[in-house]
Image: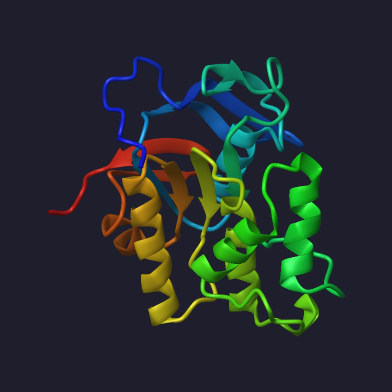
Amino acid sequence: MKEKNETNEKPVVLLKNVTKVIRRRTILDDISFQVPYSKIYGLTGPNGSGKSMLLRAICGLIYTTKGSVSVFGKEVGKDVEFPDKTGVLIEKPGFLTYLSGMRNLELLASIRNEIGKEEIREVIKLVGLNPDDKRPVRAYSTGMIQRLGLAQALMEHPELLLLDEPTSNLDRKGIASIHNLIKDLNGNGTTIILTSPNEKELEHICDRIFWIENGHLEQEPMQM
């Protein structure tokens, strides 16, 4: 088990004056933000506020107009294209819908070739799916697709997780199981940034919560 590293000098994620402008619209506006090791940070705010765009900037899916993003001490877009040791679930997961969930993850795992079938089976079970389910992904419910996307983000044992509304399309029991999984992962040392439009949800699992609106970021006071 990894131990939480409270004394590491460098944060896992460091944003300096990050601005993103698309078609003359400022999506992220001069954001400076850092996440230390082994913490769970939450982002909340209205739809279209910039939550997903901020996660995209952190993992290199978009480049910033101004400012810099560093993950594990390496600048994204300069030192690395996609940060190492990072798992990502952003917006709707994309899979080959004519293949099973297991086969989809096998193909994705073959890109890096770091894990085998047994590890894939275990992570599928971990998110509440059946690795022996032969149905194609097109037959999955939206909640099952969300769980499969989470499995994809987890399967290569990331040290940083970026999760965009990971409990969307899940019922109350499913939400509780994902919350428990997030807490367990964090207990083993994983640093997690997640978004939710529901601030109350984040209060149950996050060390700090930030409100984002019109591209501006500010810390929300935690309710005790």
Instruction: Say if 88 sits above or below 66 in the image.
Output: below
Lateral position of residue 20 relative to residue 197, left or right: right
Instruction: Say if 83 sits above or below 146 in the image.
Output: above
Q: Quadrant of residue 158?
A: top right
Q: Nearer the viewer, residue 69 or 105?
A: 105
What quarter of the picture does the C terminus occupy? bottom left
Lateral position of residue 22 relative to residue 194, left or right: right
Counting from the top left corner in percent of width and height, residue 191 is at 42, 39
Counting from the top left corner in percent of width and height, residue 71 is at 54, 25
Rendered residue at 50%/66% (across/down)? 126
Q: Is residue 50 visible?
A: yes
Q: Nearer the viewer, residue 175 or 208?
A: 175
Rendered residue at 87%/75% (across/down)? 98
Rendered residue at 62%/76% (across/down)? 144
Counting from the top left corner in percent of width and height, residue 75 is at 61, 18
Instruction: Say if 172 sits above or below 217 in the image.
Output: below
Instruction: Say if 206 sits above or below 166 in the image.
Output: above
What quarter of the picture does the N terminus occupy? top left
